[in-house]
Amino acid sequence: MKLVYPAVFKPFSDGSGGYVVEFPDLPGCVTGGDNLEEAIEMGIDAASGWILGELEDGRKVPEATPYERVSAEDGGMVNMILLDIDSYAEKYGDKAVRKNLTIPAWLNTFAEKNNLNFSKVLQDALFSMAQAKQ
């Protein structure tokens, strides 16, 4: 799913060249960057995380305000930001994904006799491997 939202970019008050990024349609979704490129990247990340959180909690995603209805204060600007929610969810989503696996019968018998939760064991092993790679 791809979504487009207006973002308001306001220059940092200290004149350093950075920007605060706010999304009028996503309450509390505010970020910033030390330059315009970083502000755009951070805006995409923040808005994508905000949207993914709503979806994972079973809530509807707010409709985007049309560009022409969004204004920026003096020195600010409005830009439309493209969000690829499917791609973001693949990297950062917490929603469980069902996977099938094949193991030897003897290992299945051992796990069942010891009341092991297959999903938990696999998640723990994969999480440990992911942590070791970082």
Image: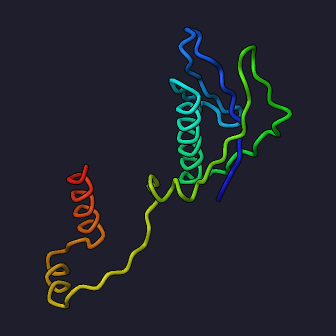
Residue 91 found in image quarter: bottom left
Kindly identify the residue that appears in the image at 43 percent across and 63 percent down.
96
32 or 96, nearer to the observer = 32
29 or 110, nearer to the observer = 29
Give the percent coordinates (x, y) of residue 130: 27, 56
Relative to residue 131, is residue 11 depicted above or below?
Answer: above
Kindly identify the residue that appears in the image at 56 percent across and 33 percent down.
37
Please count the marks in the image: 0
Give the percent coordinates (x, y) of residue 52: 55, 50
Kindly identify the residue that appears in the image at 27 percent across and 65 percent down.
120
Give the percent coordinates (x, y) of residue 65: 79, 39
Colour mapping used in the image: rainbow
Give the percent coordinates (x, y) of residue 43: 58, 36
4 or 106, nearer to the observer = 4
Q: Furthest-top residue in view?
A: 14
Residue 50 found in image quarter: top right
Direction from residue 5 to residue 58 in the image, left or right: left
Kindly identify the residue that appears in the image at 51 percent across and 56 percent down.
89
Relative to residue 35, is residue 49 depicted above or below?
Answer: below
Direction from residue 7 to residue 89 in the image, left or right: left
